[in-house]
Image (tube, helix red, strand yellow):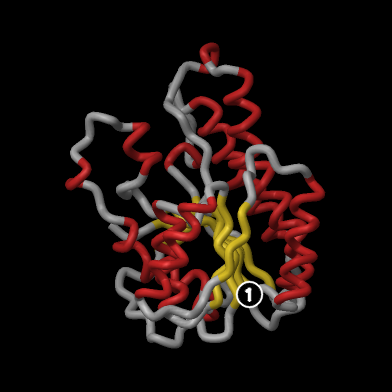
Amino acid sequence: MTHALPASFSPPADLLAGRRILITGAGEGLGKAAAMACAQHGATVILLGRTVKKLEHTYDAIERAGGVQPAIYPMNLAGAAWKDHVDLADTLEREFGTLEGLLHCAVHFKSFSPMLQIEPKDWIENLQTNLTAAYALTRELMPLMRAATDASVVFTADRPSHGARAYDGVYGVAKAAVEQMMQIWAAEQDEHSTVRLNSFNPGPIRSGVRLRGFPGERAESIALPEQVMPQLLWLLSNQSRGLNGQSTVMPE
């Protein structure tokens, strides 16, 4: 079921105070914008991504903006073994004890293409990053989120997750699978669960994925990731308590 997010939400400065939130793909695009916004609203953010230099840039930007000091955890999701996810969970349990938020922003995308032209390597890396890693991280971090009094898991959605279209390729396959996974997982939460799972479709935003998929598009005509932050912060905060298993979209 699709759920429209609040058309207007002004997040208070302490909206995420005391919450620990892991964000994948935190080195650029939506992940970086989310990391900065979360830190500015009181959260301790764990920055996860493949490229240390990009994560360090996000870290420095958070500190310059006066946000809560974050942590960095480099991981290449495309090549991560299951033990890597287990080790991450062990580290976070040791350092933080609980986790109140998990935001999946990491994405692997090269281009739209016919199914017959997808290279095997791209198929494997796409599913590994966009689907398998999203499952593995959520599974291994679930005990830390269940230990919290309130926790929110948010999967980043895209248009291919809502109906098939020619040339969506393996990216469309992965995004559709993530949406189904989210709904199944959410349905398994009972009334006493402290964890809720939803997806977030930010609509067209200025990012590397958007530029690769639509190279002829005028970048200045597309919204910046920062423009969708109020609604995403609402999802990650306790304000969204009770919302579970929903495919949330930005209001038109």
* Image location of residue 78, percent across then percent down: 63, 38
Q: Indicate the secondary structure of the residue bearing disc 1.
A: loop
Q: Is residue 69 visible?
A: yes
* Crowd rating for badge 1 (residues with CA inside 10 Å; few <14, some 14–19, many 20+): many
Left or right: where 171 falls relative to 63: right
Residue 8's quadrant in the figure?
Answer: bottom left
Residue 124's quadrant in the figure?
Answer: top right
Q: Between 163 and 47, which is closer to the camera in this rendering? A: 47
Three-letter residue code for mark 1: Glu
Please state the total of marks drawn on the protein image.
1
Left or right: where 96 falls relative to 18: right
Residue 14's quadrant in the figure?
Answer: bottom left
Q: Quadrant of the C terminus?
A: bottom left
Residue at horizontal 67 percent and vertical 46 percent from the top: 133
From the image, tell me which residue sits under label 1. 100
Q: Is residue 244 visible?
A: no
Q: Between 176 and 137, which is closer to the camera in this rendering? A: 137
Q: Between 56 and 247, which is closer to the camera in this rendering? A: 56
Residue at horizontal 36 percent and vertical 71 percent from the top: 230
Residue at horizontal 46 percent and vertical 29 percent from the top: 110
Is 186 above or below relative to 179?
A: below
Residue at horizontal 70 percent and vertical 57 percent from the top: 138
* Image location of residue 17, percent across then percent down: 52, 85
Left or right: where 162 falls relative to 94: left
* Image location of residue 107, percent across then percent down: 52, 43
* Image location of residue 250, percent across then percent down: 36, 59
Q: Residue furthest top?
A: 116
